[in-house]
Amino acid sequence: MLHVSGELNPAAGGVPVRPEINLEAALQPRQVMGTLAAAWTPSPLPQDRHRRSIYALKLRGLRDPFCEVFNEPNLDLSCERREASTIVPQVFSLFNGQATYDRAVALAVLVLREASEEAAVQAIYRRAFGRGATADEAAAAIAHWRRMTARHEKLTLAKTIRPLEVVREAVEENSGTKFTFREPLDEPFQIIEGKRDMAVQAAMTGLRLPCSRQLHEMDLLPVFQLVPSARKAQVRPLDRLQADRFPIEAMRCFHI
């Protein structure tokens, strides 16, 4: 999805990066060696957050819910066999997840540079599926785009505000007394947002819905055709697969 939306940073190597994960999971209380662990904060720069998942920092006590629903292995144990499943929560995660929302907004920003609605829709299909849209697909997408644009002209979207602190509750080890304290989150002052909050224009927000649908279909459909051929070939590492032909994020979710 990052490749399709034009956000993927193809750089290789370097220190681990912290991608954005579900906010509730990021702020959940965790313990490390008997003490409370710091909350998960994403890397400040988009070009760091938008790298291949092979470069993402992995903590045994904190799993990314988006990867977990796609059979991410247990980080506490060695993984001798990968499981693959197709289940309903994967659909909901793709349709309603913040990651898909952000990628759809970025894709809408990208294709709105095209000269016409038809050209924008064709660009979406070329980036997501490697082909142009048929006449029926283009007509349906444009009609849906216009309906959503009209709807969003009447709506006001709240701007995303990152919390500056989180209230923790703990128990004193010796007395058993409960106490609370505030953990400041310094990173929000440094984080440079992506294109999420650019979705204030009705046309852009309306186009986000068709973009989200194509990203959803791209992730669930082509991957099953890609997995056998990629495993059979076994001649090129994942880094060297032709990124313009394959959905990178779909492959990374299933860890080919």
Image (cartoon, grey):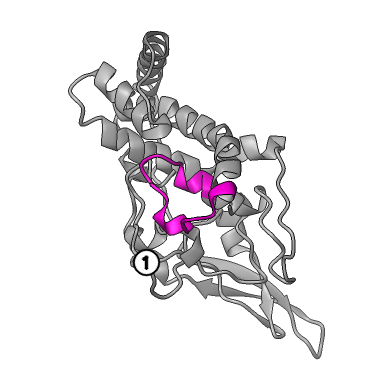
Viewer can see residue 158? no
**Residue projecting furthest to the bottom:** 174
Q: Residue at x 40, y 26 (%)?
A: 155
Tell me if residue 214 comes above or below residue 98 in the rendering: above
Q: Considering depth in this image, is 58 or 148 the residue closer to the camera?
A: 58
Residue 123: quadrant of the picture: top left
Q: Position of residue 122 (x, y in %)?
A: 31, 22
Residue at 53 percent across and 67 percent down: it is: 40
* Amino acid type of the residue tagged 1 in the rendering: Ala
Q: Position of residue 57 (x, y in %)?
A: 52, 69
Residue displayed at 54% across by 47% down:
230
Asked whether residue 243 is in view, the answer is: yes
Quarter of the image containing the N terminus?
Answer: top left
Q: Is residue 139 above or below residue 32?
A: above
Residue 236 is a magenta residue: yes
Residue 110 located left or right of residue 77: left
Q: Position of residue 66 (x, y in %)?
A: 59, 50
Q: Is residue 12 on the magenta stretch?
A: no
Residue at the (72%, 42%) spot, across then down: 85
Residue 185, image x and y in percent?
Answer: 47, 70
Q: Secondary structure at mark 1?
A: loop
Is the residue 37 above or below the residue 98 in the image? below
Total label count? Answer: 1
Between residue 250 and residue 95, name the one nearer to us: 250
Q: Which residue is mark 1?
A: 12
Q: Which residues are magenta?
A: 232-251
Nearest the eye: 59 or 24? 59
